[in-house]
Amino acid sequence: MSKPRSPEMKRLLMFVLGACLASGSRAFDFGGASDITAVSGRTSREYVRTRLANGSFAPESYVFGKGGARSGAMQDASIDKLDFLDVAHVIAGPLASQNYLPSTDPKTTRLLIMVYWGTTQAPEHANETAGMQNLQSAQDALNNAQAQGLQSTSPARQSLEGQFTTAMALVQAENKMRDQADLVNVKMLGYDSWWDESQGDHRGTAFALSRKDLVDEIEQNRYFVVLMAYDFQIAWKDKKHSLLWETRFSIRQRHHEFDKDLPVLAQYASRYFGQDSNGLIRGAVPLGHVDIGEVKSLGEVPGK
């Protein structure tokens, strides 16, 4: 996910979402439930937005690039039915609120914004894995043997201890795989600043509770969107990749519907489009329905 695929550099597909900019996000209904929305924004040292005399950002032109979708572990019509144009159309409104405007002229286009979206796949909870269940059974059997006075030198006791050791090794292997799966989601969701802060032995401290909150959060399936903005001119002319900024935002899948919540989530995250959030931002965002105009593609421009 770090850069566009090279075939896309040979022929850049440009979607100009005029209907979204014309109609805007017309009706926000914030009567829905709240949940933790996480946002992470990063910018390169080379990227600085110019401000106008009134304090607003100077307009910057962009085109969208199709980054791709990641399917979740379960069927979910609220996201599975959406294609790239559906997602890009919703994102265009919040981009416009930050003065990012769609372009039809490759010679003056500033940004190529790659759009990725999908659902993370959380690992099994530690207490539900086969290894943990085997370990619990082995521990119970060993405890019973000790309670019955079975000597440690007896073959039966040694067999039980061997089963316990094997079960412990399996749990350790599962935990390693679980940590690897967690790390994939951490990077995907932009949780790495929190992840890094929670490393180490913090037992008995507030950091331990923070670590538990982190693991609980990333080990739930989450809807996510990732925007990665590249220098269009370098991509178009030189076929190279210069990442200028990225924004990642997400919310848990449970009790939510991606197509209904995406407009509000994107609007909330838009304050970090092209801006550095200085770490992970987490907040409860009222969710509801947003009316979006009819989607419209105004053409395709071939790459140079």
Image: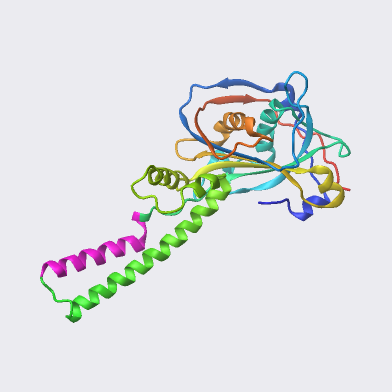
User: Residue 86, relative to residue 29: is it above or below?
Assistant: below
Residue at the top extreme of this rendering? 54
Magenta span has 187?
Answer: no
271 left or right of 170 in image: right
* Near-viewer residue (237 or 213): 213
Picture coordinates of residue 30 (x, y %)? 52, 22
- Left or right: 286, with 3 as reference point: left
Would residue 62 be visible to someone looking at this image?
yes
Residue at the spot 46% in from the left edge and 52% down from the top edge: 199
The residue located at (58%, 33%) in the rendering is 262
State whether residue 126 is above or below residue 109.
Answer: below
Displayed quadrant of residue 77: top right
Question: Foreground residue, 128 or 173?
Answer: 173
Give the magenta-colored segment's residue range.
Answer: 127-148
Q: Is residue 235 left or right of residue 30?
A: right
What percent of the width, then of the height, locates residue 237? 87, 48
Query: Is residue 172 placed above or below 37 in the rendered structure?
Result: below
